[in-house]
Each structure stands twice: as C-alpha cells, then as structure tokens.
Amino acid sequence: MSADRAVGITFEGVSKSYGDVAAVRDVSFSIAPASLVTLLGPSGCGKTTTLRLTAGLETPTAGRILIGDRDVTALTATDRNVSMVFQSYALFPHMTVLDNVAYGPSVTGRTRRAAQAAARASLATVGLAGLEARFPSELSGGQQQRVAIARALVLEPGVLLFDEPLSNLDARLRRQVREEIRELQRRLRITVVYVTHDQEEALAVSDRIIVMNNGRIAQDGRPRDLYERPADAFVAGFMGEANRVTGVLERLDGETGRVTIGGLQYTLPHRGLPAGVVEVAIRPEAILIERGPATNGALLGTVSHAAYLGSRMEYSIATEIGGLFVTSPTVSEPLSRGDMVALTLADHGVTLIRT
C-alpha cells in the first residue's frame, strides 16, 4: 500500500443518540492521512460508538463525516473504503487461515485464484507466510490477531480501524503486538484509528490521542502533551496516576507563575488560571525522595506503605499536604514503613489543572 492511498478523516459536529441516551455529543476532529490516532477513555465514554460511526456501522443523529474529501455520512460500511479489526477477531473457525483472509476479496467479485493470491500477499505483510493451511484454533492469540489484520488489509482500505485489539491477549503478548501494529502502520503509511481504554497502550502507539468522556472530547493532542499538560482533572487522572494537591499560585508574567505547595515552591506555566488557590497534578515519578528530615525547600514525609515491583518501588507517603503516591527506580536500598523522608519535585510531571 502506498502513501497516496491513505486518506484523512473529519468529524463535523457529530452526535449519536439512542432514544434519550446521547452516546456521542457534538464531536469534531480531523485525522491526518497516514497517521495513527487513538480514541481513549473509560467504558461508556463514546469511543467505540465514534469508531463505529467512522466504519459506517452506525448512522449519526446529527453532523457530518468525511473520509478524504468524500462525505460518507449516509453511506453504508461497504461503500466507505474502511476495514475494521474487531476485538473478538471474528475469524471463521471452519476455514483455514488462507480462506479467512481470501474471504473478503472473494465476496467482492475476485476469482478464487486472485483472492488467494491477494490473501497470501497480505499474510506475508503481517509475517504469517507459511501458515496458510492452519486453522484459527491452531494459532496463538498473537497470530490470530495478525490474521484479523491481514484480512482487513487485503481489501486495501484507505482507513484501518482497531477496536480494543489487545484486550484478548495476555500481558506478555500485548507489548509485542502493539509494536507490530505500529510498525505495520508506519511501513504501509495507512491511516489508523485505534480504540482502547488503556492509557499506556495509547501512549505507546499514537501520533495523537483523543480522550473522550461522557460522549465528548475532553482533550485532543500529542501523547506527551496529554500526559504532561492535562486539560483538567479527568484527563490528569485518566492518563495515568496523578497526585492531586492544593497550592497557591502567584502569577509572575504572561505565561508563568510560582506555586507554593506546603514547603515546596515550583515555577510552571499558569495556563491562564488566576492567582490564588489552585489544584496541582503531580505524577508519582516527579516526586524525588531523600532519606532523613526535610531541609529548606523540601517537604517532610513518612513512609506508610512500600511495595517492590521488580523494576521500581511504589510508596505511599504521609505529608502535611496529604497522602502522596510515589514511584522510585531505586530498588537496591528500599525505604521501609515508618522511614522519614524529604520530598522535592523534578523538572517535569507537575502541572496546574482546571477543576
């Protein structure tokens, strides 16, 4: 597949209701050709409905959907040049791998020979050449996922849609398969819309992430921006662990301010918030720990819980500003319950949030 096959996607004020229940509310966004954009959010946020609207499996109640320059709002799924990889893979258990992948070209009118030739090429693209004669039950979960991708790719779509593609895989396979999906998208230069509720998965594969909540877009941006500069408390909490504490903001100029958090002071963008009491999100890895009593510019704390997780330690620390959740890569000399510590903040992972 060449880059000129990739097309963009545009939603213009799209809504979808089921009776009195609004699943998607006035959603607008644009996805650039040959990019991978993830729809991220909790169950019931509207992400899967948005994916199904893109696929043509649902019809909008209001608004307009364009794929490329073509208005597809009223078109069926078969008329949209879109393929979808379902969460369940939906492979035919009585068909071989080759026949599963050749099924799509066959029903669109290709001869059996042409359909199988296309299927073999698609299977080779996803690294499954030589497994054509096997049945789905004879494959691992990761291989079944790749068969489902090959079956979608064989139709040469302009857009490829993934609905929770890793949810049926065990933890050891998830990283491998997500890397394969990302590498394939880059190599084929295809537009991908990817749905997940897993923020780590979204951070790992995406050019952009659209976070959804209650049928609306909560924030849309690059993975680093969403993690380090969440728009509000919901995004801060959903994009990973975040300690939410109260501070006092003193605006310094048009962009920055000084925030006092207990005994700590920190300069950061004020994000348009007025001076006064503010809410601050602090990532667990942004809190730096030293043994012993606090010195000037540090916050005194006491370890109330410690857990060893192999590559890192996790601590709960009681402080004057409340309990803090902290992670540390230092596992050789771990802290113990009751230890006194001094806490400071790193130069990243701290942001003001709108409540």
Image (tube, rainbow, N blue to C red):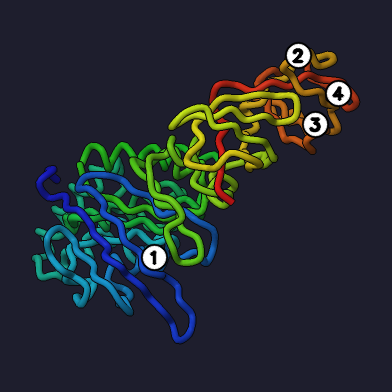
Query: In the rendered structure, which disc, 4 or 3, sits on the residue that comes first in sequence?
Result: 3
Give the residue pinned by disc 3. Answer: 317
* Viewer-nearest residue: 336 or 119: 336
Given the image, on which type of amino acid does mark 3 rest? Ile
Alpha carbon separation for disc pair 3 and 2: 19 Å
| Percent position of residue 343, x then y | 73, 22
Graded by Cα atoms within 10 Å as few (under 14), some (14 to 19) or many (20 or more), the crowding at tag 1 reads few
| Percent position of residue 205, x then y | 39, 40
Alpha carbon separation for disc pair 1 and 2: 61 Å
In this orientation, does residue 347 appear? yes
Alpha carbon separation for disc pair 3 and 1: 47 Å
Element assignment for label 4: loop
Alpha carbon separation for disc pair 4 and 3: 11 Å
Graded by Cα atoms within 10 Å as few (under 14), some (14 to 19) or many (20 or more), the crowding at tag 4 reads some
Residue 49 as seen in the image, left or right of residue 303: left
Give the residue pinned by disc 4. Answer: 336
* Marks 3,1: beta carbons within 8 A: no
Residue 181: numbered disc: none
